[in-house]
Image (cartoon, rainbow, N blue to C red):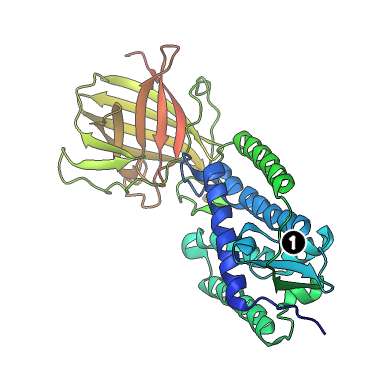
Amino acid sequence: MSSTKYAGIFKRFFAELIDLIIIGIICYVLFIWGQPEDEGNLKYFVGSFLLSNLIGFAYFILFESSLGSTPGKMSLQIAVTDKAGGQISLIQAIIRLLIKPSGVPLEFIAGVTIIASKQGEESPLWGLVFLSFLAIILVIIDCLILVFKPQRQALHDRIAKTVVIDFDGEYKSPQKVLLQLAALAVVSRLIFNAVPETPLSWLKPIAPNTAMIAQPSSSPEPSTPPVPEVSTSPSAPETPTSDKDNMYICKDKVVLGSNSNLDGKWEIQYVQANLRHKVSLSMEGQSGKSITQFFDTEANTSVTIEQDIKLGTSDRGTWLVGFNPVDAKTKKEVKTYSPDNFFLEINPSGEQGGYKCDDSNSRSPMSIQKLADK
């Protein structure tokens, strides 16, 4: 009765693969190319996950509802139609994509898995295994339904009342769809540019020494702007074996030893995770001592940490590198507190400033001022 030939699983698979490559290139250029790939950052998360998925969904929905075929399907001469061979509606295209395992369900599972995997040892391994297994099962079920149905309808085709057929005719001009996607790309890029580079604690393990509350202080607030997180540098060694060890701190290669004249007493303040820390620093030559004060909310008490400080140099300037943090009262090592590392710089106003780099290579702006000798 009908000579319609329905597209097989291999054509549909390779067409989908071509489309995903095209979408990947577009989203890479828009949101990732030239950007710091800090996965614990709100900007990276919005660009690489939310906005990229928005463009991917619009790509399939607009092409299939307007032209009946995406560029990947066009290249393999297949098209999506209704059961009568006509053009599908926008609603059908949306329903088809929402139920498609390789569409929203798989994206949701992938997103949850990525977020959970970044919580470190606290993540239940069985949860990640279950989500990965569920994703594979969904795709396999969809493929099996496609193979054994006479009209080669996958589950999403049956619910949306669509079929995928071999098509050797002429496709409509894609000009309108391309303009719509270009407009969406421009708007998405503007949204991406407006997103602040804010750290997301639920996208990465939380440093154990930052759960503190600030103490009131009359010292001036830090005047340096926040510096984006950098999480791709090698980790620094815990304890150097000599005064000339190479260390990696916030992507800087730091060599201990410096000729900077920082003799005297200094006060440093920095805010990390909305919490203020006050540091009293005493330097003589290339070494010194620091006392860091904060309020530990878990122990519900004020804590004072003493550290050894050594000067260090990198290609960009001077570092104050902390070692051997101990409790000022008990003189015992505090294993949950990572040594403080401070980078010094001069602000455009002429004041000294810089930032503090913690154990996860996150940067927090700081203020520093020299205290009068008594």
| SS class, disc 1 | loop
Q: Quadrant of the C terminus?
A: top left
User: Where on the picture, by quarter, is residue 281?
Assistant: top left
> What residue lies at 29% left-to-right and 27% top-to-bottom?
318
Q: Which residue is mark 1?
A: 68
Q: Is residue 224 visible?
A: yes
Residue nearest the observer in this picture, 303 or 134: 134
Q: Horizontal and vertical percent for residue 45?
A: 57, 48
Q: How many marks?
A: 1
Looking at the picture, does residue 296 appear above or below residue 105? Answer: above
Looking at the picture, does residue 335 appear above or below residue 13? Answer: above
Crowding near the residue tagged with mark 1, few <14, some 14–19, many ≥20 C-alpha atoms within 10 Å: many
Residue nearest the observer in this picture, 122 or 151: 151
> What residue lies at 81% left-to-right and 63% top-to-bottom?
87
Residue nearest the observer in this picture, 214 or 18: 18
Query: In this rendering, would 16 be left or right of 288?
Result: right
Residue nearest the observer in this picture, 61 or 5: 5
Q: Horizontal and vertical percent for residue 254?
A: 25, 36
Check disc 1 and give the amino acid type: Gly
Looking at the picture, does residue 182 appear above or below residue 14? Answer: above
Q: Horizontal and vertical percent for residue 263?
A: 25, 20
Q: Horizontal and vertical percent for residue 96?
A: 75, 67
> What residue lies at 51% left-to-right and 40% top-to-bottom?
295
Q: Is residue 297 visible?
A: no
Q: Quadrant of the N terminus?
A: bottom right
